[in-house]
Image (cartoon, rainbow, N blue to C red):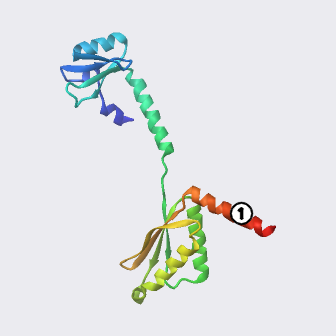
Amino acid sequence: MKAIALEYRINREITTSRCRLIDQDGEQIGIFDTADALRRADDLGYDLVEIAPDAQPPVCRIMDYSKFKYEQSVKEKQARKKQQRIEIKEMKFRPKVDTHDYETKKKHILRFLGAGAKVKVTIMFRGRETSHPEQGLNILMKLAEELKELAVIENQPKLEGRNMTMLIAPLPKQKAAKTDKGEDAHAEDQDA
């Protein structure tokens, strides 16, 4: 909210000698001396706000500045509510991961994807394991194959030093809903 106060100069803060004046209804009145425009705004019980300082001459508007600031803060709050933050979770594997550990970590990845987060899957190599990056690639491709109904690979597996990473993102809601409906219909066909 402080950014709004700094953004506009109001009343006596306006230093230019002349300005283009807009009244409280949004109608352009003309070019006035700033002192006359200030007097006019004061007579109406409003503030004079410089809304376009870079224009020649600067544009000033007669308005209720406190009401304007309040409306701007409400708009910003609404915009923040509609914003979506995408989290990136990370799951780390070793090249010689046991099947039980693999399944457990896969369940965590499914939970993260279900919550709408992206997942960065990392295979960490140590010592001589770096000479066999295909083991890590096999794990990542197996995981991608098993999750293809629920997720899409956003960044293909890439070897960066001693780590191989891949970024998985959840499918958009529309596609995920279609696959769920398709599975339900298929299950009903088998029951009949």
Tell me the amino acid under the disc marked 1.
Answer: Asp
| Residue 16 percent coordinates (x, y) | 19, 23
Q: Residue at left 49%, top 50%?
A: 84
Name the side, left or right, on which 124 lies relative to 10.
Answer: right
| Residue 18 percent coordinates (x, y) | 19, 19
Of residue 174 and residue 158, the one placed in the foreground of this image is 174
**Disc 1 packing (10 Å; few <14; some 14–19; many ≥20):** few
| The N terminus, quarter of image | top left
| Residue 155 percent coordinates (x, y) | 43, 68
Name the side, left or right, on which 108 lies relative to 155.
Answer: right
| Residue 156 percent coordinates (x, y) | 43, 72
- The residue at which mark 1 appears reads as 184
Of residue 154 and residue 69, the one placed in the foreground of this image is 154
Q: Is residue 73 above or below residue 110?
A: above
Secondary structure beneath dot 1 equals: helix
Quadrant position of residue 175 = bottom right
Q: Residue at left 57%, top 78%?
A: 102
